[in-house]
């Protein structure tokens, strides 16, 4: 399945609200397995949210204090 992936990396510096953003198209049959490349570190928290219609999936990650949000929209 093809997805548009938007990855936001939240800046850890206080007072700086800017985010690094990466947008690309990916192809995968298993989003959980695809996400394994981002779930790295000693302390990893991950929350998955799926839209009611199944068209969008968002993962909120905290990996050793580095916050990321990675969203997938079906193409």
Image (cartoon, grey):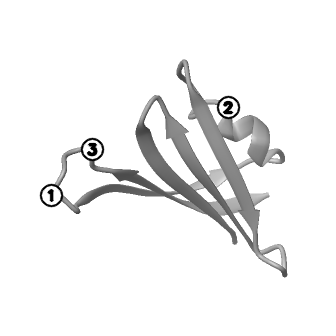
In the rendered image of this protein, does residue 47 appear above or below residue 58? above
Q: Which residue is mark 3?
A: 12
Q: Residues within 10 Å of mark 1 (few under 14, many from 20)?
A: few
Asked whether the beta carbons under mark 1 and mark 2 sit within 8 Å of each other, the answer is no
Location of residue 74 by image quarter: bottom right
- Observer-side mark, 2 or 3, equals 3
Q: Quadrant of the C terminus?
A: bottom right
Mark 2 secondary-structure assignment? loop
Q: Is residue 56 left or right of residue 64?
A: right
Residue 6 x %, y %? 50, 61
Front-most of residues 51 and 27: 51
Q: Which residue is mark 1?
A: 15
Q: Residue furthest left?
A: 15
Residue 22 x %, y %? 40, 54
Q: Quadrant of the N terminus?
A: bottom right
Front-most of residues 55 and 14: 14
Measured in 3D between alpha carbons, the distance from the residue under mark 2 to the one under mark 3, in whole angstroms, is: 22 Å
Mark 1 secondary-structure assignment? loop
Q: Residues within 10 Å of mark 2 (few under 14, many from 20)?
A: few
Residue 64 x %, y %? 46, 28
Of labels 2 and 3, earlier in sequence is 3
Q: Which residue is mark 2?
A: 36
């Amino acid at each position: 399945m093809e997805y548009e992936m938007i990855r936001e990396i939240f800046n850890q510096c206080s007072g700086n609200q800017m985010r690094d953003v990466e947008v690309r198209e990916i192809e995968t049959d298993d989003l959980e397995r695809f996400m394994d490349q981002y779930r790295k570190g000693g302390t990893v928290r991950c929350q998955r949210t799926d839209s009611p219609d199944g068209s969008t999936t968002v993962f909120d990650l905290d990996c050793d204090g580095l916050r990321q949000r990675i969203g997938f929209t079906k193409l």
